[in-house]
Amino acid sequence: MADRPHIVIGVCGSIAAFKIAVLHKYLRDHAEVTVAMTPSATQFVGPQTFLALTGNPVITSLWEPTHSKPKHIDLADELDLLLIAPATANILAKAAHGIADEPVSTLIMSSLPDEKPIVFAPAMNTRMWKNPATVENVKTLRERGYHFIAPESGDLACGWQGEGRLAEPQVIAKQVFALLGLDDVKVTG
């Protein structure tokens, strides 16, 4: 790991994607951050937002010929931790079943949880979170060595109240720093 760890954040299509811009505030002084986005994530937050915050190109396509190797391979080689946030039911299913068809799922498949931490911070409707398929996918991923930052209970964008809300940015940052061995980093609002 270099002086400043390299965190890659895979942003998925959820209204909670806006919280990732806030999360960056906690990470920026202690880590280099690069963002990859699913096509649906770009419908919630524009890639330009993350480019402005991180200063790094945002990966939104598998077909950007900017490097000698595919960018998802370069990033998998360079990262110290991969954070998928917000992690949707869709991305959990793709990861559990080895589907790689857009930048974030391909990045997950290009990274191995026994080499570097891969962390999912789920966000979805309560029924989706409790759906037997999602429960099974989470169980499978945990058994394979992936980490999870549990969703919180509260008001959901769909108008419901219940479990499925993305953990607060400070909570995510604390757990990310702990996985990187940076327990001494103070995360304050």
Image (spheres, rainbow, N blue to C red):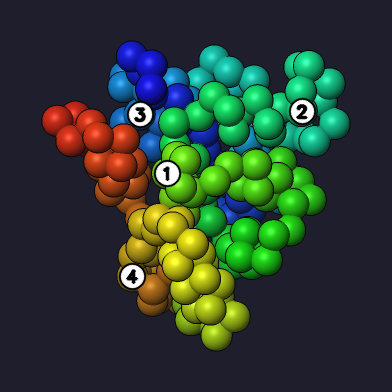
Query: Which label's residue is closer to the chain start, 4 or 3?
Result: 3
Between the C-alphas of marks 2 and 1, the distance is 21 Å
Between the C-alphas of marks 4 and 1, the distance is 25 Å
Between the C-alphas of marks 4 and 3, the distance is 24 Å
Q: Nearer the viewer, mark 4 or mark 1?
A: 1
Q: Nearer the viewer, mark 4 or mark 3?
A: 3
Query: Which label's residue is closer to the chain start, 1 or 3?
Result: 3
Q: Residue at x 61, y 47 (%)?
A: 108
Which residue, given by chain and number where applicable, does mark 4 sit on? 153
Which residue, given by chain and number where applicable, does mark 1 sit on? 117
Q: Amino acid at mark 4?
A: Ser
Callout 1 touching callout 3 (CB < 8 Å)? no
Q: Where does residue 33 sit, x and y in percent of width and height? A: 48, 25
Q: Nearer the viewer, mark 2 or mark 4?
A: 2
Q: Amino acid at mark 3?
A: Leu
Callout 2 touching callout 4 (CB < 8 Å)? no
Q: Amino acid at mark 1?
A: Pro
Q: Where does residue 119 sit, x and y in percent of width and height? A: 44, 50
Callout 4 touching callout 3 (CB < 8 Å)? no
Between the C-alphas of marks 1 and 3, the distance is 16 Å
Query: Which label's residue is closer to the chain start, 3 or 2?
Result: 3
Callout 3 touching callout 2 (CB < 8 Å)? no
Counting other residues with Cα less than 10 Å from the Cα at mark 4, is it few (<14), some (14-19), or many (20 or more)?
some
Does residue 24 appear to the left or right of 75 in the view shown?
A: left
Which residue, given by chain and number where applicable, does mark 3 sit on? 27
Which residue, given by chain and number where applicable, does mark 2 sit on? 70
